[in-house]
């Protein structure tokens, strides 16, 4: 029995969809198969990279993954919650120093430092996110701005613990059978995969849907009984936790931390990376991390005297060409390619 015959017997009329409704828009007919192939190819490439790249290029790829973890958390606040944070560089620095002190001063094994940095920054993020109960937009940005400004001088005040302005070296993880840079890459890759799965589950949960509702229609969300302040504070804490975990990974990767690394410019760079990559998109954090890592390096090679100027111009160009970020630009490019394909049914 067809759908039309069943609708006639039950007395209900089913609305026509797809080709039955006259939809002749060309679409890619093997969407799921293409997605599965893309995932497999990406996984194989990610595992094989350490064995084909030279050490410095592998170090850069590892930094991309580190910043991607931080941007996953920042996107939770900026993209899904619609708030502005200028303090995630500080949470990044706190996580880096928690790992550095635990390894360098206390002699603890490095696997312990990752959950410790995540827990510490989660608590700090919860405390810093409490103003979200009363503040919104630029007011919350000012609060997080103050956190980013205070951290570097505070780290320099305790040289016996943090190493002061000179910073402190840290022993990097070592793996049997692999070079140090390869072992660190695999550790960071595994952590980034877990972070992506965590954010995916979080944004699809009831709390994640509440954040989207609060961002789009705050008044309607309040009427439906959603406590905006509670959801925003929790999201800010989770976001800070991701930044702290990324800071611990940064310590593992570089083997050195210094207060001047975690200034306000880092917070602004992370915010720019989140916007350029594409807010509230699955690929946005990775694309933004690629820009955050590659643009300063390329600018330094083009003009060592003014890397900030070249980086700023490139950022302005990207935002002008792709207002919805690089992820939106890729989405439009894929739609343009699909428009040239022969007409077919949707997958």
Image (spheres, rainbow, N blue to C red):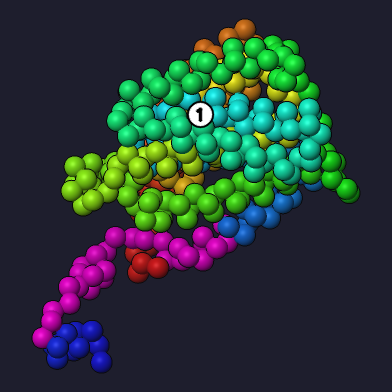
Which residue bears the numbered disc 1? 88
Where does the magenta region start and end?
11-38
Which part of the image, by quadrant, shows the C terminus?
bottom left
Looking at the image, which is closer to me, 324 or 343? 324
| Residue at 18% over, 48% down | 223
Is 33 one of the magenta-colored residues? Answer: yes
- Above or below, 118 against 31 in this view is above
229 left or right of 12 in image = right
| Residue at 79% over, 38% down | 108
Is 146 one of the magenta-colored residues? Answer: no
Q: Residues within 10 Å of mark 1 (few under 14, many from 20)?
A: many
| Residue at 36% over, 44% down | 231
Look at the image and tell me whether residue 253 can be seen: no
- Above or below, 307 against 175 in this view is above
Which percent across, then down, holds residue 1?
25, 92
- Above or below, 138 against 171 in this view is above
206 left or right of 219 in image = right
Which percent across, then down, holds residue 248?
66, 35
236 left or right of 244 in image = left
Which image quadrant for residue 247? top right
């Amino acid at each position: 029995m067809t759908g039309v015959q069943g609708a006639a017997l039950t007395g209900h009329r089913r609305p026509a969809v797809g080709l039955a409704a006259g939809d002749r828009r060309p679409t890619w007919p093997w969407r799921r198969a293409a997605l599965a192939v893309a995932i497999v190819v990406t996984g194989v490439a990610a595992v094989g990279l350490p064995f084909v790249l030279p050490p410095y290029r592998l170090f850069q790829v590892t930094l991309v993954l580190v910043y991607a973890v931080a941007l996953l958390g920042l996107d939770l606040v900026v993209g899904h919650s619609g708030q502005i944070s200028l303090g995630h560089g500080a949470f990044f620095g706190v996580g880096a120093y928690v790992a550095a002190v635990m390894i360098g001063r206390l002699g603890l094994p490095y696997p312990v430092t990752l959950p410790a940095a995540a827990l510490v920054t989660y608590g700090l993020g919860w405390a810093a996110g409490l103003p979200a109960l009363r503040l919104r937009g630029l007011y919350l940005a000012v609060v997080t701005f103050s956190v980013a400004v205070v951290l570097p001088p505070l780290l320099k005040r305790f040289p016996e613990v943090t190493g002061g302005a000179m910073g402190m070296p840290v022993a990097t993880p070592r793996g049997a059978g692999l070079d140090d840079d390869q072992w660190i890459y695999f550790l960071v890759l595994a952590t980034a995969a877990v972070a992506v799965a965590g954010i995916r589950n979080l944004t699809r949960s009831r709390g994640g849907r509440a954040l989207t509702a609060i961002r789009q229609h705050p008044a309607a969300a309040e009427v439906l009984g959603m406590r905006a302040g509670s959801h925003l504070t929790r999201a800010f804490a989770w976001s800070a936790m991701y930044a702290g975990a990324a800071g611990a990974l940064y310590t593992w990767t570089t083997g050195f931390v210094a207060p001047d690394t975690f200034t306000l410019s880092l917070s602004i760079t992370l915010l720019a990376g989140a916007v350029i990559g594409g807010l509230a998109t699955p690929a946005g954090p990775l694309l933004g991390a690629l820009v955050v890592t590659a643009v300063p390096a390329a600018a330094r090679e083009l003009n060592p005297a003014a890397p900030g100027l070249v980086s700023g111009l490139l950022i302005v160009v990207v935002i002008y060409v792709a207002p919805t970020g690089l992820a939106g630009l890729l989405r439009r490019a894929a739609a343009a390619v699909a428009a040239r394909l022969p007409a077919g049914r949707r997958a």
